[in-house]
């Protein structure tokens, strides 16, 4: 019975017209030969050319493929230093000094696919399968709220039991939870739920939009068609490269205008994947006038029962990882950049200094692991291996010492500053300033409600410095109403009010 309904469900997932409509003369936007040619035509760029490209990034413009290819071909350590330095400068210009925090919530590891690198794949009989009930999802939400999180990304395998209706109900379950912060007695709830799930047809994406999701995230895994086919068996849903390639075009069309792209680094040449992410950005910009809300660049880590995940010939070294993060930062200046707990703490710290804007903390990827408090040494319920198991307070303290404000801001999404609006503001460097205010307000909430004494002390002196900066910025001097509202809301938060934003 189960097999029969699964078979029917699988047959109805892919809607061919929702691929074909985006093709140009029957071709998609990834032309491997063109990418290889760009990479070979741009070897040994001169220092002057690299500096011109860096200036273009600093003026917050998406780079052209030849420009990104040139950066990827730099060999001089001295020029790489300039690239690293400029990457952080671009980030500060667009996003200021804030780091947005979130937690992933794995809802189900049931999956009909057989991706060679993933512990959730159907053929992996070492994996204990579990799909959370909505009450269990609420319990998981309580656990992450107790840490101080305000933003979640829900993650699902691809399966008829976790289809869009389950996802929409899961989103509603998360939003329904309210928890009291132990330190202050103030109420807290999740303010933005994002989704990482398989590609869907537009009608289903509208259901997710209706459930109130923020960002919809789909990683292409690899943009290299042959590798894609090698690691995703052709008799599975995920075997369809183009269905995945246009997942976010469909999301845009459904009205979800914050879309998140990514590649799983370690499946193929990292330079090719960076070019793929750029071409993806350019095609979204061409169709919808706006690029991705965020870019992710997970590195493959060992997964239960997956040989490839431990011994891929394309595994990316730490040095190359730093380079790819910096080049992505410069290539798409307006995109948020997400580094996750797949990376060790030291690497996370290093790439935050290269312009990452978001990270997770207190991450558990086992199904139900937040409430079970299982540690991720427990591979049988995990999709891959965690490199940074630190809790939220520890990571926030570390970034505060580096001068970065932890932000839980969800104001953009709740005030309609999404999609084209937010990307326009980012390119004029206005959103960064708005978010500076909201970052301070949400950091203040965190310090009062959840922080350890040490983090509070470090955080409060950072906030004071930040407020001093805000008060002296011409941008705000010319907008006294904003400054006035900010001061009033900051005082109200100190007085016990919550969830105030601009
Ligand atoms: N099933 C959905 C899909 O494939 O799009 C979403 C969930 S999947 C659990 C989320 C992401 O985890 C994948 O897109 C992939 O990039 C990443 N992932 C899978 N195996 C991994 C591994 N061994 N190491 C690091 N990341 C991995
Ligand atoms: Fe399933 Fe996604 Fe894992 Fe592939 S990456 S096996 S689709 S959960």
Image (cartoon, grey):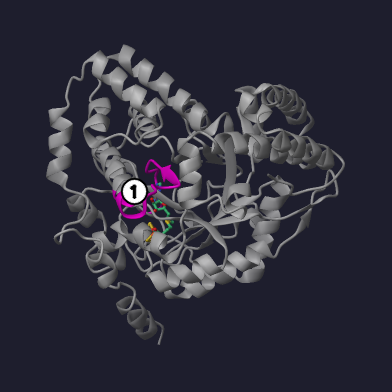
Residue receiving disc 1: 285
x and y percent of residue 408 in the render?
64, 43
Q: Quadrant of residue 176?
A: bottom right
State the count of labels. 1
Residue 167 placed where, x, y %?
52, 68
Name the residue rendered at 49%, 25% in the picture.
353
- 148 on left or right of 491: left
> Is residue 354 in view from this perspective?
no
281 displayed left or right of 418: left
Q: Quadrant of ligand 2?
A: bottom left
- The residue closer to the viewer here, 51 or 391, is 51
189 with respect to 112 (left or right) = right
User: On screen, 15 above or below 255?
Assistant: below
Dominant SS of magenta comes to loop
Percent across and percent down for residue 349 are: 52, 28
Is 357 covered by the magenta stretch?
Answer: no
Q: Residue at x 45, y 37 (%)?
A: 427
Residue at position x 70%, y 45% in the image: 501
Residue 245 x/y as whole percent: 29, 57
Quarter of the image containing the C terminus? top right
Does the magenta portion include 296? yes
Residue pushed farthest front? 478
Residue visible at 51% across and 33% down?
429
- Seen in the image, is 302 located left or right of residue 191? left
Quadrant containing the N terminus is bottom left
Q: Nearer the viewer, residue 46 or 416?
A: 416
Residue range corresponding to the magenta coloring: 283-305
Q: Secondary structure at mark 1?
A: helix
Is any part of residue 212 visible from this angle? yes
Would the CB of label 1 be found within 8 Å of ligand 1? no
């Amino acid at each position: 019975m189960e097999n029969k309904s699964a078979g029917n469900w699988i047959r109805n997932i892919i809607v061919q017209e929702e691929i074909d409509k985006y093709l140009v003369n029957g071709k998609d936007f990834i032309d491997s030969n063109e990418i290889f040619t760009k990479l070979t035509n741009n070897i040994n760029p001169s220092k002057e050319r690299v500096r011109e490209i860096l200036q273009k990034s600093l003026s917050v413009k998406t780079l052209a493929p030849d420009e990104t290819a040139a950066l990827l071909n730099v060999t001089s350590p001295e020029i790489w230093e300039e690239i690293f330095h400029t990457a952080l400068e671009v980030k500060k210009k667009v996003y200021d000094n804030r780091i947005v925090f979130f937690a992933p919530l794995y809802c189900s590891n049931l999956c009909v696919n057989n991706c060679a690198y993933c512990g959730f794949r159907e053929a992996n009989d070492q994996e204990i399968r579990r799909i959370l009930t909505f009450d269990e999802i609420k319990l998981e939400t309580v656990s992450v709220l107790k840490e101080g999180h305000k933003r979640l990304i829900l993650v699902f395998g691809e399966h008829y039991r976790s289809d869009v209706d389950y996802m929409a109900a899961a989103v509603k379950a998360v939003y329904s939870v309210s928890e009291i912060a132990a330190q202050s007695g103030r109420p807290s709830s999740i303010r933005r739920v994002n989704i990482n799930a398989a590609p869907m047809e537009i009608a289903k994406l509208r259901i997710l939009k209706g459930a109130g999701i923020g960002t919809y995230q789909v990683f292409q895994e690899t943009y290299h068609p042959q590798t894609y086919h090698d690691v995703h068996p052709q008799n599975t849903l995920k075997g369809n490269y183009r269905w995945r390639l246009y997942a976010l075009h469909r999301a845009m069309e459904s009205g979800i205008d914050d879309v998140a792209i990514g590649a799983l680094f370690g499946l193929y040449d990292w330079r090719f994947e960076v070019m793929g992410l750029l071409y993806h950005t350019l095609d979204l910009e061409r169709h919808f006038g706006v690029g991705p809300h965020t870019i992710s660049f997970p590195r493959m880590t060992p997964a239960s029962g997956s040989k490839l995940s431990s011994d891929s010939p394309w595994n990316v070294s730490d040095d190359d990882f730093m380079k790819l993060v910096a080049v992505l930062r410069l290539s798409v200046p307006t995109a948020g950049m997400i580094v996750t707990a797949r990376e060790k703490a030291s690497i996370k710290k290093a790439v935050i200094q290269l312009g990452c804007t978001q990270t997770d903390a207190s991450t558990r990827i086992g199904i139900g692991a937040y409430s079970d408090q299982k540690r991720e040494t427990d591979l049988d319920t995990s999709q891959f291996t965690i490199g940074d198991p630190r809790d939220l307070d520890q990571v926030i303290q570390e970034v505060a010492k580096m001068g970065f404000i932890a932000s839980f801001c969800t104001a953009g999404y709740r005030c309609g500053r999404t999609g084209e609006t937010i990307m326009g503001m980012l390119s004029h460097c206005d959103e960064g300033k708005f978010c500076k205010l909201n970052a301070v307000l949400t950091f203040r909430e965190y310090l009062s409600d959840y922080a350890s004494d040490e983090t509070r002390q470090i955080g409060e002196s950072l906030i004071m410095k930040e407020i001093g900066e805000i008060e002296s910025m011409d941008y705000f001097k010319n907008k006294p109403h904003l400054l006035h509202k900010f001061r009033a809301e900051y005082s109200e938060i100190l007085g016990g009010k919550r969830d105030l934003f601009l």
